[in-house]
Image (cartoon, rainbow, N blue to C red):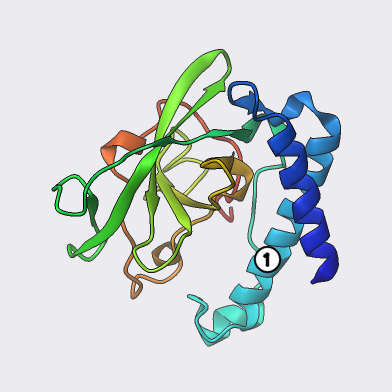
Amino acid sequence: MKWRTILFLLIIGALLYSFSVPPIRAGVDQTLAALQEKRVLEWKKERDKFFKSHQRSPLLPVEKRNFKGLKYFPFDPQYVFSGKIERYIFHINNPKYYATFLTNKGTNKRYIRYGKFHFNLDGREYTIEIYKSILSDSLFIPFKDKTNGKESYEGGRYIDAEILPGYKMVLDFNMAYYPSCAYNDHFICVLPPKENMLNIEIRAGERNQK
């Protein structure tokens, strides 16, 4: 665990060094890209371990026995972005304070509207809405893109992120993952909001098994 902590701090240190300029593509910095790729590889190993052996894995017992690992697009540093979150400052009594998501079961789930993040990909600027769990400080980014239904899960994907000093964050699409209901429809999963339906292919992160 100690070396993982050191690796993470090195990545964050390199990112914070670049925060004096607008959001950047990590592909510009080969050292940073190599560090982030190593972090993503470790994250993939942890996810495979969870799916294979954890009691909360969405896989059935027979599926766990035959599980060979999740599938991902190749790591691509052009899908790693660092920058400052454009914060939303809403009073808790303001109706906009909470975002209510529809789930795959037709129920609702609430998150806090935290802000939005701007990034540039292939010469175009995009904006994605950032949410925060009510019970933790973890950031939650559900989204859809043009790979859905073809190369990736039709219901969209999720990204988790951390709040860094100065309300900054790293948005890494290489760490996009499927909701658990993609593997087991007994799970309840939120549906990405229309604000996070990206009109571009995000060929990074988890992809279809076949």
* Image side of residue 105 versus residue 15, left or right: left
Quarter of the image with the N terminus is: bottom right
* Image side of residue 14 versus residue 63, left or right: right
Residue 162 position, x and y percent, is 55, 53
Q: Which residue shows up at 46% across the image and 26% down it? A: 200
Q: Is residue 182 visible?
A: yes
State whether residue 75 is above or below residue 18: below
Residue 155 position, x and y percent, is 37, 50
Residue 103 position, x and y percent, is 25, 60
* Residue that extends furthest to the top in the rendered view of this protein: 123
Q: Which residue shows up at 37% across the image and 49% down it? A: 131
Packing grade of label 1 (10 A; few <14, some 14-19, many >=20) is: some
State whether residue 204 is above or below residue 9: above
Q: Which residue shows up at 65% across the image and 43% down it? A: 73
Residue underneath mark 1: 69
Q: Nearer the viewer, residue 145 or 79?
A: 79
Q: Is residue 36 visible?
A: no
Residue flagged by tag 1: what amino acid is it? Gly
* Image side of residue 68 versus residue 109, left or right: right
Q: Nearer the viewer, residue 132 or 174?
A: 132
Element class at badge 1: loop
Q: Nearer the viewer, residue 99 or 107?
A: 99
Residue 24 position, x and y percent, is 64, 25
* Image side of residue 17 versus residue 128, left or right: right
